[in-house]
Image (cartoon, grey):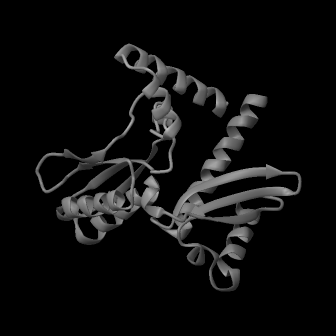
């Protein structure tokens, strides 16, 4: 019984998230998080356009609250807005932006849309990014194009800090899938070394390459312990 209840709750959460996404439209919302509190359910909507989601005098929020009560049988839903300050580092918003561009101007513009978005991400200071566009891209057969720059982890624990998302563009030529991966500039990598004054003083004390390498390992170990 507990397993069925768990599956039902997760299914309801998925349906709520999909409904909210469709209600406000593609490209408006990045993520939706549902939290359960003693006083009711808390729906946290992450967006870079809070005014659009809230509506005039909060009418859209009130409408969403009533729908959640009536359609999804929530007792006391409370909708919170979480503003995204840097949408160019949010993979879902970037993927939706490319999808909307392709739907508006057609699949012929996939290169221009991808390079435009990639340039914006790069100029904002991201460490790395990768865009994959797949589908009927001005060709008789489906094909896939990859656009990338910088440093991007794909395996191991370090890959978990990379923001990934997918979106779909429905064009006249057919369905086009978009995958986006972004490594934001404020992310701290486990193998990242900052060359500061303490680091240089430790290196100066050791002349041989083996000793310098050993010093680097010790500093890494100290920083890992300090983070814990």
**65, above or below 187, in the image:** below
| Residue nearer the viewer, 58 or 187 | 187
Residue 154, quarter of picture: top left
Q: Compared with residue 100, is residue 177 higher up or lower down, i.e. above or below? A: above
What residue is drawn where x is 83% and y is 57%? 40
Residue 106 screen position, x and y as percent? 22, 66
Query: Which residue is the extreme one toward the left?
Result: 140
**Quadrant for the C terminus in the image:** top right
Question: Closer to the camera, 177 or 227?
Answer: 227
Residue at 26 percent across and 58 percent down: it is 114
Q: Is residue 81 visible?
A: yes
Residue 147: % across, % down: 24, 49
> x and y percent of residue 204 in the render?
43, 28
Q: Is residue 4 left or right of residue 208?
A: right
Residue closest to the far bottom: 56
What residue is drawn where x is 59% and y is 30%? 223
On screen, residue 126 versus residue 102, left or right, reads: right
Residue 76 position by quadrant: bottom right
- Measured as percent of width and height from the top left, residue 9 is found at 71, 43
| The N terminus, quarter of image | top right
Compare residues 146 and 148 and report the one nearer the observer: 148
């Amino acid at each position: 019984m507990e397993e069925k209840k768990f599956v039902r709750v997760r299914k309801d959460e998925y349906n709520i998230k999909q409904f909210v996404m469709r209600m406000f439209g593609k490209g408006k919302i990045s993520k939706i998080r549902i939290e359960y509190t003693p006083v009711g359910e808390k729906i946290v909507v992450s967006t870079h356009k809070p005014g659009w989601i809230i509506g005039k005098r909060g009418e859209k929020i009130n409408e969403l609250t009533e729908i959640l009560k009536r359609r999804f049988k929530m007792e006391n839903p409370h909708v919170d807005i979480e503003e995204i300050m840097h949408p160019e580092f949010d993979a879902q918003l970037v993927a939706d932006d490319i999808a909307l561009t392709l739907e508006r101007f057609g699949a012929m513009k996939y290169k221009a849309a991808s390079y435009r978005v990639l340039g914006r991400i790069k100029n904002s200071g991201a460490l790395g990014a990768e865009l994959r566009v797949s589908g009927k891209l001005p060709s008789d057969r489906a094909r896939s194009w990859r656009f990338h720059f910088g440093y991007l982890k794909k395996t191991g624990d370090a890959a978990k800090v990379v923001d990934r998302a997918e979106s779909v563009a429905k064009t006249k030529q057919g369905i086009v899938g978009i995958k986006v991966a972004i490594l934001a500039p404020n992310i701290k990598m486990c193998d990242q070394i900052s060359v500061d004054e303490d680091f240089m003083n430790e290196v100066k004390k050791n002349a041989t390459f083996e000793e310098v390498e050993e010093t680097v390992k010790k500093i890494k170990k100290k920083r890992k312990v300090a983070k814990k």
